[in-house]
Amino acid sequence: MKLSLTLCSTLAIVALAASQDSPKHDYVPNSETAVVIAEAVLIPVYGKKHIESERPFRATLKDDVWTVAGTLYCAGGKPQTDTPPTCDGGVAVVQISKIDARVISMTHYK
């Protein structure tokens, strides 16, 4: 009797633990959502004015990770489009998990 009670209890605990695994969701389903999250975490660190000056932000998806980067503007207000860059400066870059919306990394290049 004790053995079957122990076995049933163990099975119940294992079943409960297995059901606690968080299912894979796409909490960040598109680039627009990724940009909103990136701006939300960047503004408290770098300031609203500074982050707004790097708009538009672009988001690219690779291996369930969104990489969101700002736009670098050269003198005269023209966006930097050359590779490698021909003007000085850097932009904010945030990596966000598509699955659970976790911020993987956040930096601002100079």
Image (cartoon, helix red, strand yellow):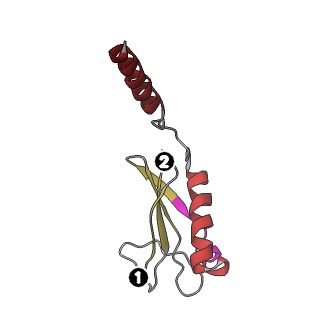
Lower position in the chain sequence, tag 1 or tag 2: 1
Q: Position of residue 53 (x, y in %)?
A: 62, 77
Please, is residue 49 above or below residue 59 in the view? below
The residue sitting at 52% across, 41% down in the picture is 26
Asked if the stretch drawn in magenta spans residue 64, the answer is: no
Depth order, front residue of 90/24: 24
| Quadrant for the C terminus in the image | bottom left
Q: Left or right: 77 with respect to 22?
A: right
Q: Residue furthest front?
A: 2
Q: Is residue 20 left or right of residue 35?
A: left
Magenta-colored stretch includes residue 56: yes
Tag 1: residue type?
Answer: Thr
Residue range highlighted in magenta? 51-58
Please tell me whether mark 2 sits on a helix, a strand or a loop: loop
Q: Amino acid at mark 2?
A: Lys
- Name the residue tied to disc 2: 98
Judged from the image, the secondary structure of the residue bearing numbered disc 1 is: loop
Residue 108 in picture, x, y percent from top left: 47, 77
Q: Label 1 vs label 2: CA separation?
A: 32 Å
Residue occupying the point 60% across, 52% down: 33
